[in-house]
Amino acid sequence: MKKYFLVMFLLISIILCAQSEETNNSGLNIELSPGDQIRIKYHNINNNGERVVESEAYRIQQDGKINHTLLGKVKLAGKKANAAESFLQNQFSKYIRNPNVSLSLIETQLNKVLLYGAVSRPGVYPVSATTRVADFIIQHGGTSEEADLSHITISRKGGESKNFNMKNFLYTDQPSNNIKLKAGDKVIVPEKSEGGRLGYSEDYILEEGNVLEIQVSEAGEQAASSQEMDKYIINEQGNIRHPLLGEVQLAGKSIRKARELLKDRAQNYLGSPVVELNLIQKQENTVFLFGEVPNPGIYPIHQNVRLAEFIAQRGGVTRSADIDEIILTRKSGNKIVFDFEDFLHNREDRNNVTLVNGDRIIVQSKNRGILYSISQALRDYRYIISFITSLGTLYLLSLRIR
C-alpha cells in the first residue's frame, strides 16, 4: 500500500510540475498584443515591513496598455513577453528593491487573417501589426497558376473592401495598395477569367460569399471615374454595405434584379444614376479543420470530398491525435463521430461522409484520460500539491530508512 501511494504522489507531482513549467515558460518569445491576458508577479513590502508576493492578472487594452495598481498605465503591446518582463523589472525597481518580476501569458489574442481562393495553402494565419498583404500571401505558399493577381480582395470586418493588384506590385515599382493587414481581414484570391469577371448570366442568383464589383455614378461621369471599381462581399446576412446607399440586401436576387435595386436606391441621391455590377468571385463551400492537425484552418471544398480523404490531403494528423474519435459537427448541430483507425484498417466507411459547406472537423487529443482531467482540475493548486507530495515522499522514505 505504501508503494502504491508513493507511486501516485510521484506521478501527480510530475504531471503538475510539467504543467507548471509549460505555464510559466511558454510564450516568452510571443509579441504581446491588445487583447492578451497576462499575469504579473513581483515581490513587495506590506504594512508590517514583511516581504510578500503580489500576483495580479491584466488584460492589455486596445491602446496597448495595462493600468497597473502601482505603476499606472504601462504600454506592453509590441514587446516580446520576455522583453516586457525585463521592462517591468526596471519600472518596479523605481519603487521596490529587488522586485523579482515574472510575467506569464494566461491567454494570447493573436491577430488572425483568413486566406482563401486560388492559393497554395488556404487557411487562418496569425499576423503582426506590420504584416502587409503581399508578404502575407508569399509567406503562406503564394498563389496557384489559376490566380488572377490583378484582382485580389481584402475584406475587413466593418464591410470595407480593398483591391490589391499583386501583378503591379511584383513587376513594377508601384506600391499598388500593399496595405497592412488587421485582425479579422479576409484575403481572397480569385481565379483568372476574362477581364477579371465571371461569365454568369444575368439570371444568376447571388448568395453569401459572392464578391462583386460595383460602381454607382451619375450618367456621363463614368469616363472620368477611376478604372478600379469598388469590391464588396455579400455578408452572412445577405447584405453589402455601400458608402452612398448604405446596407443593401442582395442575396437571393439575380444579377439583373440586384442592379435594378441599386439603381432604384441611387435615385435618392443622383439625378440620372448609372450602376455597373459584375460578379468576380462566386461562393465557395468551406469547412473548418481544428485540433491535432499540422495545418488547422478554413478550407474551400469541391463536390464529393469525403472526410478521410480531406484530412489526408491537409497533411494528416499529429502524433497526439485520437484518430478513434474524430468529431464532425454540421451547421444544424448534428454530430458525427468518425473512427479513422477503423477506416484505415477495416475499410469501414459508414461515417466517412461527404463534406458539406460549414462542416467543422475537430481532431481531438489523446490526452483526455483520467490523469489529464485530474491535472487540469488541480492545476491551480499545483504549488500546494507539490509541497504536500514532497512532504509525503520524505515521510515514506523515512519509514523505509527505519
Image: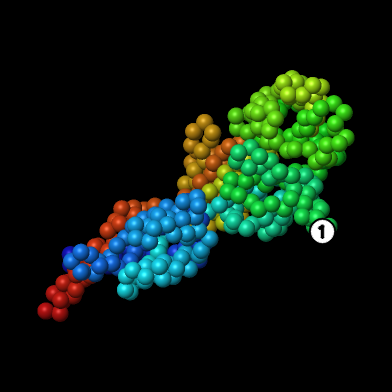
Task: Tell me the residue at 73%/38% (across/down).
Answer: 231
Give the secondary structure at mark 1: loop
Residue where numbered disc 1 is placed = 173
Residue 261, position in %: x, y?
Answer: 73, 21
- Image coordinates for residue 378, horizontal then vertical, percent: 29, 56
5 vs 213, left or right, is: left
Q: Is residue 299 left or right of residue 380?
A: right
| Residue shown at the point (82%, 33%) measured from the top left | 199
Judging depth in this view, the residue of 90 and 368 nearest the camera is: 90
Instruction: Give the colouring mode of the picture.
Output: rainbow
Mark yes or no: residue 310 visible.
no
Q: Residue at x 38, y 61 (%)?
A: 71
Q: Amino acid at mark 1?
A: Asp
Q: Position of residue 285 (x, y in %)?
A: 65, 37
Task: Classify 219 as above or below 281.
Answer: above
In the rendered image, the vertical position of residue 177 relative to residue 25, given as above or below: above
For residue 263, what is the image quadrant? top right
Q: Residue at x 57, y 56 (%)?
A: 294
For the N terminus, the image quarter is bottom left
The front one of 53 and 272 is 272
Q: Position of residue 76 (x, y in %)?
A: 47, 60
**For the residue carrying disc 1, how many other residues have a C-alpha within 10 Å: few (<14), some (14-19), or many (20+)?**
few
Q: Is residue 23 left or right of residue 321?
A: left
